[in-house]
């Protein structure tokens, strides 16, 4: 992952991806192609493997020790499971946002600069001006600058949930990731905060490839250009969001969209 | 429909009875502590003077002060902690942050718990065998402190591990997902947020170590030695052993003298506990989640 993007139109491409938790198979022959620079949403009933798929892209599933994966996942044209791949670089280029905002128990400023310190400025003292510029740029990008600029030294965990979630997105940006993976980023937020985060996603679109899991049909419809429907560890349908919601190709998709499974 | 029933009344009576019972137990528990402290202060208090703290014992330990014993205790405890704290914290970090749950780690955990339950006289015998004789440190501060260190190690490990595990797992996940290594996660997030608990555990250990007699008696503490130790290879006096000596081994000791020594020992321990509590409160005030 050290050299920049090769010419591919897909930011994420999986081929025949199978994944087992111990002896339980959670993903079956998943072939997914996520286009670069757009927002793709992933929907499907609880337990169908959305989080699993997301987490295998940045290889965080490996931490569990009892997970086995076959098939391949390419991110920006590079196989992330190849033997020469440095896992730290994978995590740097692929940012992850969680359901529950999880800012670190340090100041707002330190949260934003955290990943940068790990990757870009490790081992050298970051001049204060450079640091402040990075922080400001990231916070502006997530539309948070104006509301927190006077309290950058305060504990991040004291922010409102909406602000926390935006901060969790902001802290990924200084290391210039290619892909942002978001696992139900709005489900802990109220409708107004949800709207604000969706607005932010549109703002980030283009510069980043965004893959977002959601249980909220309206959100998938509003906030994504393509949509993937999963069922029991398989991808059933993947297509243009507007099209999929109006004329789903498969019966299962139609049922799910109409709210017939949980 | 909201009237009080016979059942409500009965439950209330039981509840009142239980409350009184538990209250009485609590008082009974606190009583001995208060009596001990009161007696020490009343009988030992008049002994305490600057001179008592800074003079050597004289006349077969029946007169004079306790200076060498006080200094000796500080030596023994400091050296013991210098050994047990770094090792204990490192072991706890390994067990809680790195080790996978295998039969090996389970066996080690079991060993640690059992080590905490070993009586101190057994540690003393081990200390003699291992440090005094086998490693040929002789009876010295080093041998005694190593013995104390072995004794305190399990408690340091357990206290540290508990503080580490009190740091929510999601912070670690957040770090790992940003590409932090385990060590970066520990350094930047886990340790800063658990250090108050770790220090509390350590300081409480200090006070326990200061009072121990058996483990130092055969390994490095002397009954009477009116010189200050020059290095860790020297023997030394210690408050706990001094108290034991003047209470049981020496005749014609003024009745109030042991109370005075005990008061200094308890004062030292309480002062350390107070520092620990103050420190913890201060650190707690700075962390929030
Ligand atoms: N750590 C794990 N160990 C074992 N099985 C797991 C683990 N995580 C998930 N699973 C199983 O894998 C399947 C897929 O889970 P996953 O979390 O990916 O579903 P999901 O689509 O994200 O569901 P939800 O919408 O509830 O978040 C489920 O059957 C789940 O029980
Ligand atoms: Mg999920």
Image (cartoon, coloured by chain):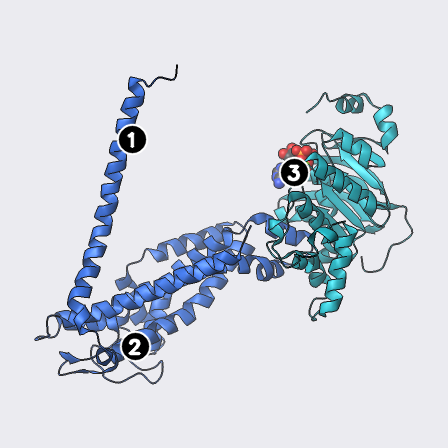
Chain colours: A cyan, B blue
Mark 2, other Cα within 10 Å: few <14 / some 14–19 / many ≥20: many
Residue wearing tag 2: B72
Horizontal and vertical percent position of residue A258? 76, 21
Q: Is mark 1 within 8 Å of ligand 1?
A: no
Subunit under mark 1: B
Q: For the residue labelled by badge 2, is the local secondary structure a helix, a strand or a loop?
A: helix
In this rendering, position of residue A164 left or right of residue A134: left
Dot 3: element: loop
Indicate the chain on which mark 3 is placed: A
Quarter the N terminus of chain A occupies: bottom right
For the residue pair B280 and A15, the one nearer the viewer reads as B280
Query: Cα distance, mark 3 to mark 2?
Result: 59 Å
**From this viewpoint, which residue is outermost toward the left?**
B252
Q: Which residue is label 3 attached to?
A: A188
Residue B15 disc label: 1
Q: Name the side, left or right, on which A69 lies relative to B242.
A: right
In this view, which residue lies farthest toward the right? A7
């Amino acid at each position: 992952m050290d050299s920049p993007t090769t010419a591919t139109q897909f930011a994420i491409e999986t081929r025949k991806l199978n994944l087992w938790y111990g002896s339980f198979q959670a993903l079956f022959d998943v072939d997914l192609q996520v286009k670069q620079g757009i927002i793709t949403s992933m929907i499907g009933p609880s337990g169908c493997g959305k989080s699993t798929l997301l987490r295998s892209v940045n290889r965080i599933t490996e931490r569990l020790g009892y997970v086995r994966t076959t098939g391949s996942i390419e991110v920006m044209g590079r196989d992330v499971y190849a033997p020469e791949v440095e896992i730290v670089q994978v995590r740097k280029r692929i940012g992850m946002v969680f359901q529950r905002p999880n800012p670190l128990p340090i100041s707002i400023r330190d949260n934003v600069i955290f990943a940068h310190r790990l990757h870009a400025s490790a081992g050298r003292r970051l001049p204060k001006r450079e640091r402040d510029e990075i922080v400001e740029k990231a916070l502006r990008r997530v539309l948070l600058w104006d509301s927190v600029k006077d309290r950058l030294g305060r504990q991040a965990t004291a922010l409102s949930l909406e602000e926390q979630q935006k901060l969790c997105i902001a802290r990924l940006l200084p290391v210039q990731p290619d892909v942002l993976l978001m696992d139900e980023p709005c489900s802990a937020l109220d409708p107004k905060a949800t709207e604000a985060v969706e607005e932010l996603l549109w703002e980030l679109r283009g510069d980043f490839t965004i893959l977002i899991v959601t249980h909220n049909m309206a959100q998938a419809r509003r906030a994504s250009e393509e949509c993937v429907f999963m069922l029991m560890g398989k991808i059933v349908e993947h297509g243009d969001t507007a099209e999929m919601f109006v004329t789903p190709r498969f019966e299962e998709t139609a049922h799910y969209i109409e709210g017939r499974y949980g | 429909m909201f009237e009080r029933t016979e059942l409500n009344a009965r439950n209330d009576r039981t509840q009142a009875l239980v409350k009184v019972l538990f209250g009485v137990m609590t008082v009974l528990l606190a009583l001995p502590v208060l009596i001990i402290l009161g007696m020490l202060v009343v009988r030992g208090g008049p002994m305490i003077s600057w001179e008592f703290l800074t003079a050597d014992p004289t006349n077969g330990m029946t007169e004079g002060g306790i200076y060498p014993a006080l200094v000796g205790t500080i030596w023994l405890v400091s050296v013991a902690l210098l050994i047990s704290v770094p090792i204990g914290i490192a072991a706890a970090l390994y067990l809680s942050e790195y080790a996978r749950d295998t039969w090996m780690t389970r066996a080690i955990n079991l060993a640690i718990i059992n080590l905490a339950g070993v009586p101190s006289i057994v540690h003393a015998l081990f200390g003699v065998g291992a440090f005094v004789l086998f490693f040929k440190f002789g009876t010295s501060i080093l041998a005694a402190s190593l013995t104390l260190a072995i004794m305190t190690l399990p408690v340091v490990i357990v206290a540290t591990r508990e503080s580490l595990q009190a740091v929510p797992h999601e912070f670690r996940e957040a770090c790992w997902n940003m590409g932090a290594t385990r060590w970066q996660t520990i350094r930047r997030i886990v340790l800063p947020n658990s250090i108050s608990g770790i220090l509390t555990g350590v300081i409480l250990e200090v006070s326990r170590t200061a009072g121990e007699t058996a483990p130092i008696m055969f390994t490095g503490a002397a009954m009477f030695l009116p010189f200050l130790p020059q290095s860790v290879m020297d023997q030394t006096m210690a408050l706990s052993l001094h108290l034991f000596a003047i209470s049981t081994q020496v005749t014609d000791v003024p009745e109030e003298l042991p109370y005075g020594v005990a008061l200094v020992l308890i004062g030292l321990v309480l002062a350390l506990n107070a520092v620990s509590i103050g420190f913890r409160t201060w650190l707690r005030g700075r962390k929030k989640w």
